[in-house]
Amino acid sequence: MEFSSKLLENAVYEMSQLPGIGKRTALRLVLHMLKQPSEQTLRLTSALQRVRNDIKFCSNCHNISDVVLCEICANPKRDESLVCVVEDIRDVMAIENTGQYKGLYHVLGGKISPMEGIGPQNLTISSLLTKVKEGIIKELIFALSSTMEGDTTNFYIYKQLEGTEVKTSTIARGIAVGDELEYADEVTLGRSIINRIPFENSLKSS
Amino acid sequence: MEFSSKLLENAVYEMSQLPGIGKRTALRLVLHMLKQPSEQTLRLTSALQRVRNDIKFCSNCHNISDVVLCEICANPKRDESLVCVVEDIRDVMAIENTGQYKGLYHVLGGKISPMEGIGPQNLTISSLLTKVKEGIIKELIFALSSTMEGDTTNFYIYKQLEGTEVKTSTIARGIAVGDELEYADEVTLGRSIINRIPFENSLKSS
């Protein structure tokens, strides 16, 4: 693409550095901004600057937070003996939306992925192990995505926990509520049969 | 969506004001920025601020430019008697990419669209008419998209030109080079038969 303006070219280039935003989309977004009042661009850029510079991570669960201890960790009604291990804030938001979980979280900040150069030292695993050794946590729920990286990370943490008394579990994998069996993949359907639950239990959870 | 951080919520909200960016995409983009060095966010925000505040529009063709008279209008090799009327800078870039056009442009900045509240006074039509009356322009090529808004705008300008001696034309609509006839829509195929050209002409343009 040849631009008639260096300023425009530069803005489009920086915008296209974001994941999933190509040059054409970036140009469309920048041209949109030029048509809007300049206050709107100012609001966007200052919001991005502030979130980048002033963002904090909760000292206990490492979730994104405006304060040192996030709302969830600071809530005395939550069960601190139960900790759900997740990848990032989006997983916390998804689980919170269910309204079913009353324990705390531990945000790893990613998954072990040698391909992307992410090792255990890049995640908050050592902080999790320190918390486990303090003895307050009774159960860890692994809720990482069931990919190779997720399984590797689960297993790495599981091995590190040897010698401690903490119980570990993973969220149930199975056919989504409302889904048809015929469209389910074999792995999920197979697991959902092996890990079947007593019928009475399914009556409670609805 | 419930956020654990007001800063994050605000950044996601401002990001989701951009066209085609929903809340989930905005969250993904902001989380990506948080994982990158803060210099990258600074580069993006300052590029956006600069383009919004310092952008100029060419005094002749109204295209986006860093200087008062854009490169194309300032080029003495271009034919100033031929002017192509387009909607925005993307159309200029597309036509420039062909390397086939040696005239100048006139960027309208949009199309007449009562639905979106865009009337002739919101576009650069009066500036175009002033240029035509100066008598240097011999031919105007309408190259707006062939939608209802594009056709309306073409016709509005055409009517305003009554009494002047300028020639008007529109770019050829037809089957794209390399396309199969069986997949073409009827309107395009119909027009391409009505507006057929002498076979010798098609030999020159390749």
Image (cartoon, coloured by chain):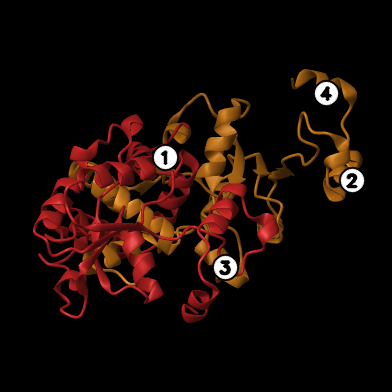
Chain colours: A orange, B red
Q: Is there CB contact under 8 Å for labels 3 and 2?
A: no
The structure residue drawn at horizontal position 38% and vertical position 58%, both measured from the top left corner, is A26
Q: Nearer the viewer, mark 4 or mark 1?
A: 1
- Picture coordinates of residue A105 (x, y %)? 55, 40
| First along the sequence among labels 3 and 2 | 3
- Regarding mark 4 in the picture, which secondary structure is present there? helix
Whether residue A50 appears in this view of the structure is no
Give the residue number, with chain letter if any, for mark 3.
A119
The residue type indicated by label 2 comes to Gly
Give the residue number, with chain letter if any, for mark 4.
A201
Whether residue A42 appears in this view of the structure is yes
* Residue A190: mark in rendering: 2
- Picture coordinates of residue A157 (x, y %)? 65, 57
Q: CA distance from mark 3 to mark 2?
A: 31 Å
Q: Is residue B202 left or right of residue A29?
A: right
- Give whichever of B87, B136 is nearer the camera: B136
Q: Is residue B60 left or right of residue A153?
A: left
The residue type indicated by label 4 comes to Asn
The residue type indicated by label 1 comes to Met
Q: How many marks?
A: 4
- Give whichever of A14, A12 is nearer the camera: A12
Badges 4 and 2, same chain: yes
Give the residue number, with chain letter if any, for mark 1.
B148
The residue type indicated by label 3 comes to Gly
Q: Is there CB contact under 8 Å for labels 4 and 2?
A: no
- Picture coordinates of residue B104 (x, y %)? 23, 67
| First along the sequence among labels 4 and 2 | 2
